[in-house]
Image: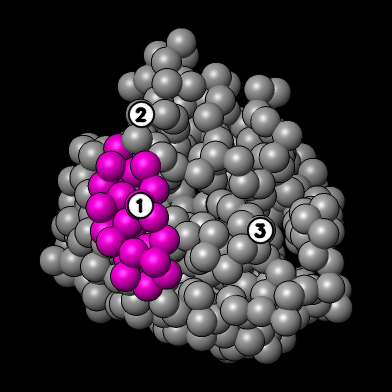
Amino acid sequence: MKIAVVTYGTEGDTRPLAALCHALDKAGHASVLLADASTLGTAQRLGVHSHASAGDIRGALGSGGAIANVVAQSDRPGAAAKALADIANVQAAAWLRQTVETARGCDAIVCAGLAAFVGLSAAEALDVPAIGAGMFPLTPTREFASPFLPPSRVPRFLNRASHHLVTAMLWRAFRPALNAARAEVCGLPPRRRMWTAHPALYGFSPSLVPRPADWPANAAVCGQWIPPAPDWQPPQPLSTFLAAGEPPVYIGFGSMTGFDASRLRQVVVDAVAGRRAVLNPGWSGIDVQQLPANFHVVGDTPHDWLFPRMSVVVHHGGSGTTHSAARAGVPSVVVPFAGDQFFWAHRMALAGVAPEAVAGSRLGADQLARAIAFADRPEVRAKAHALGEQMRAENGLARAVEAIEKIVTATGRPDGCR
């Protein structure tokens, strides 16, 4: 089989799909990945055939960019939908043209992230199966609210309706530009309603989010899509720091920007209160100069190597980081800023491996200190250890590859349309 995979988002959005492409290639198929140029590092390391999409996700993440503005307004769920739509709508025609060109001759298109509607349209134009992919649940269910809404704000009886509400809001924001691109690039008629019949594969752990009983048969929870660990050795200063004392607290907020970095720096320093800590400033803009001696600063470091060596992982609640912390068997403190991060914070609290979250925009030193103390409790550590063992036994990539093979075979196109 030849499979095209298209997505658009941060490096954390692209990495699991690069892992999926690598797994498809290892299973004897041929894959090609289309994503933002700055997010293709994992794909290039794994030798996955890839192309760069139009756009600049780093610009959207930078100071004053669309995503940064969402972080600064994390108490406004509608801001996320608008910001995402603004990014996708500008690039809709370019993405659709690139996807059709990239996927021509393929047996199926796997589509995710901001490029999902484009991928579905390209599959329609090329008359090949479309397979949705997601790192958080989008299929409506009564069991929990839409990941784009703060869990505490949605009464349980409105859970299913909340999914439809968010879907309708997103579709309303994306539809005009998408339909214009469909006509311009492919000569397709306007789409009045969203797609619902295509299969959806989810690359998150059933240990954190069990498959809802009311989901349709075309939605599957595979387990996390994890790339093979790189042949990586820690810098000597990091090895020396880790060997010099008790396991430290890890603190990192990934690609989050738009908050008061100097205030957050002081909150972190005060909350840790002299305890050993590893800080990854990421894209936060936190000034790492003249930090107290109990801090060690790291750059891009493989989570699967680093997190098992930590005592607590303080993070923003992105799907990938959340899974890495849970799989490491270490308690978390989740400080969500935007999007589905509040959902993952809630799932970690439900699992008993993290305290209830406090939004990053409202985080204070006392709150963070109490949260770290909660994560230090023996019963929390025991639950984290058990959850880690359970997640490490999962093989999400194998399940995803098997599902894709069955979907393509069921369409009668197992040998392609080249």
Label 2 vs label 1, nearer the camera: 1
Q: Amino acid at mark 2?
A: Leu
- Tell me the distance, in whole angstroms, between the alpha carbons under discs 3 and 1: 19 Å
Judging by the rendered image, the residue that carries numbered circle 2 is: 165
Expressed as whole percent of the image width and height from the top left, the position of residue 294 reads: 41, 67
Judging by the rendered image, the residue that carries numbered circle 1 is: 190
Label 3 vs label 1, nearer the camera: 1
Above or below residue 84? Residue 290 is below
Disc 3 secondary structure class: loop
- Between 378 and 174, the residue placed more toward the observer is 174
Q: Is residue 12 visible?
A: no
Disc 1 secondary structure class: loop
Q: Quadrant of residue 384?
A: top right
Residue name at image x 26 percent, y 47 percent: 173
Q: Residues within 10 Å of mark 3 (few under 14, many from 20)?
A: many
Residue name at image x 47 percent, y 71 percent: 11
Region in magenta: 169-192
Left or right: 184, with 308 as reference point: left
- Nearer-N-terminus badge (2/3): 3
Judging by the rendered image, the residue that carries numbered circle 3 is: 129
Based on the picture, tell me whether residue 179 belongs to the magenta stretch. Answer: yes
Q: Quadrant of residue 33?
A: bottom right
Q: Residues within 10 Å of mark 1 (few under 14, many from 20)?
A: some
Mark 3 near mark 1, Cβ–Cβ under 8 Å?
no
